[in-house]
């Protein structure tokens, strides 16, 4: 079984969000929604209070990179 995800796993979380919401532009997502969706991801074990703006932004940028790559395919 893979290790549980935490707030510092931005790349993996971004990948999983791109899988879950393939048509959604990450730049249109409010941080309140992003926070909730991360907490709801299967395998996420981080403390919901352990996030901050920098961590959410890192996740959003990782998701954006994955989203853009998929748009090119």
Image (cartoon, helix red, strand yellow):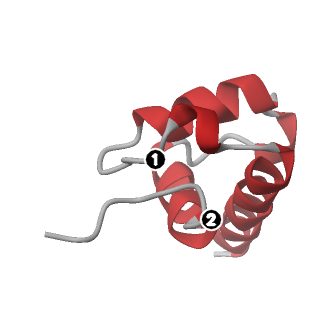
| CA distance for labels 2 and 1 | 12 Å
| Element type where label 2 sits in the image | helix
Q: Position of residue 5 (x, y in %)?
A: 41, 59
- The residue located at (68%, 25%) in the rendering is 33
Residue at point 32% right, 60% down? 4
Write down the quadrant of residue 27 in the picture: top right
The mark that comes first in sequence, 2 or 1, is: 2
* Residue marked by disc 2: 10
Which residue position holds label 1?
A: 46
Left or right, residue 33 beside residue 48: right
Q: Secondary structure at mark 1?
A: loop
Q: Is residue 27 left or right of residue 8?
A: right
Indicate the quadrant containing the C terminus: top left, top right, bottom left or bottom right: bottom right
Residue 40 percent coordinates (x, y):
42, 32
Eyeballing the image, is 2 above or below 50?
A: below
Q: Return the x and y of residue 42 as percentages of the image width and height.
A: 31, 44
Question: Residue shown at 48%/35% (left/top)?
Answer: 39
The residue shown at (85%, 34%) is 28
Instruction: Kindly report which numbered mark, 2 or 1, lies closer to the viewer in this rendering.
Output: 1
Category of crowding for the residue at label 1, using alpha-carbon neighbours closer than 10 angstroms: few (below 14), some (14–19), many (at least 20): some
Residue 49, compared with residue 53, is above or below; it is above
């Amino acid at each position: 079984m893979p290790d549980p995800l935490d707030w510092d796993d931005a790349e993996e979380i971004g990948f999983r969000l791109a899988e879950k919401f393939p048509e959604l532009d990450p730049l249109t997502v409010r941080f309140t929604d992003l926070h909730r969706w991360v907490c709801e991801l299967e395998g996420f074990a981080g403390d919901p209070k352990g996030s901050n703006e920098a961590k959410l932004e890192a996740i959003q940028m990782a998701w954006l990179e994955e989203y853009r790559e998929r748009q090119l395919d």
